[in-house]
Amino acid sequence: MNEKVRGLAAGDGDTKTIARAASNTPRGRDLRLDLFRGLANWAIFLDHIPNNAVAWLTTRNYGFSDAADIFVFISGYTAAFVYGRRMTRQGFVAGTALLFRRVWQLYVAHVLLFVFYAASIGYVAQRYGHSHLLDEFNVSGLIEKPVATLSQGLTLAFKPLNLDVLPLYIVLMAAFPPMLWSMMRFPMSALAASLGMYLLARHNGWNLPAYPSGGWYFNPFAWQFLFAIGAWAALGGAETTASVRRTPALLVASAAFLVFALIVTLAGRFESLGSIVPPELLALFEPNDKTNLAPYRILHFLALSILVVRFVPADGALLRSRALRPAIICGERSLEVFCVGIFLSFVGHFVLEIYYEGLIGQVAVSVGGIAILTLVAAYRSWSRTLDRQPIPKSASAREGRSNKMESSP
């Protein structure tokens, strides 16, 4: 029996099903995932700077889905790719433990970002007399009710403006072990169960409560479906649907839906284009229901992904070009880049509001921010290589003698 299969077969479940899931799990790193995750992080940074003309380069202005959809789908894909193999080799308990270790890392990153973000907003608001920032970024509660607000922040119920994606990711990852276990054995049934929860959540208004009122901006009961689609694709769904995805009819339908989404989105942005789309039709898509992940957002993302997979091959030379390396490296170090990007979006907003908010300033802040994100990603990648570098024998000998001397009485 294959070593990967033996690990899970020692636990529970049907051996043939597990073997099939193991064989369907991708073995190499798909640079397209890193590329689009890096681009999504750049887009999140740009979109979170108010009145930023450079943000018109991001996908949210030309269709129903945006960088958040890309981020969640790829997160589900990579989670299944990484932890599916670990569960296969080491069993469900070990795989779950490794998943929860990642959840803890995400939670610590969120808490640190929360503290630095809120402290920076409070400092700028007090130092420069811009008290409106406290309400604008939803941190006034930390001034009025610091203990209650901070406590709710630690439970993820309270979130300042723009700090919604990471808590969603934390919850989805924490709930992922049983989904991953079932999806490795019964992929279509697990995906159907996820779809059922998505439909019930939209119909019944299910959401997690937010503090001090309302619900989460990203409803986890709805967004888990896109996360599950990503996991399903990683565990063989992409392979089993490859022949269907390549059919000319589906490619044409996907392109047509993207054009339709482009027209509707632009008609909602510009009154001069409003006559192109009938008001009754426009009302179905505006405002865009991001909180509960409207079905047309999922369709738009899937149509976009079908064309990307078709025309951007995984082994293409373009993915190894220098031009795309900054985005790819930002995708490889996604957590660090995301956290720094959220913080820099506030810094960019502050710089534009205090000093110069013209087009040149917007371009400078945007380009400078992306350059900083790339440097952060490059540094983190380089620093991780230090752990894998062998220590020279002479240095090892000196270190051994040093340790002996320190342990001598």
Image (spheres, rainbow, N blue to C red):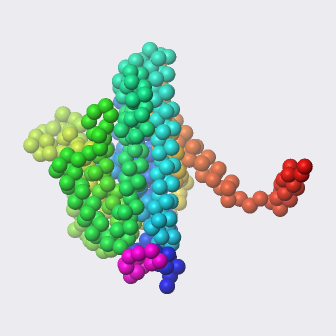
Is there any visible trace of residue 202 in the rendered image?
Answer: yes
Instruction: Return the residue nearer the eye: 58 or 11.
Output: 11
Relative horizontal placement of residue 135, taking residue 84 as reference (left or right): left
Q: Which residue lies furthest to the top in this view?
A: 129
Indicate the position of residue 325 as horizontal and vertical percent values: 53, 53
394 w.r.t. 142: above or below: below
Instruction: Return the residue nearer the eye: 142 or 327.
Output: 142
Indicate the position of residue 270 as horizontal and vertical percent values: 22, 35
Q: Residue visible at 44% across and 14% down?
A: 129
Q: Residue visible at 83% across and 62% down?
A: 393
Q: Residue furthest front?
A: 409
**Residue 15 in magenta stretch:** yes
Is there any visible trace of residue 23 in the rendered image?
Answer: no
Instruction: Return the residue nearer the eye: 268 or 407.
Output: 407
Indicate the position of residue 144 as horizontal and vertical percent values: 38, 21
Q: Residue visible at 71% across and 59% down?
A: 389
**Residue 102 in magenta stretch:** no
Relative horizontal placement of residue 294, taking residue 241 as reference (left or right): left
Q: Give the range drawn in magenta.
A: 9-20
Number of numbered discs on residues: 0
186 w.r.t. 275: above or below: below
Q: Residue visible at 51% across and 72% down?
A: 89
Indicate the position of residue 150 as horizontal and vertical percent values: 43, 31
Relative horizontal placement of residue 32, taking residue 261 as reference (left or right): right
Instruction: Return the residue nearer the eye: 276 or 42.
Output: 42
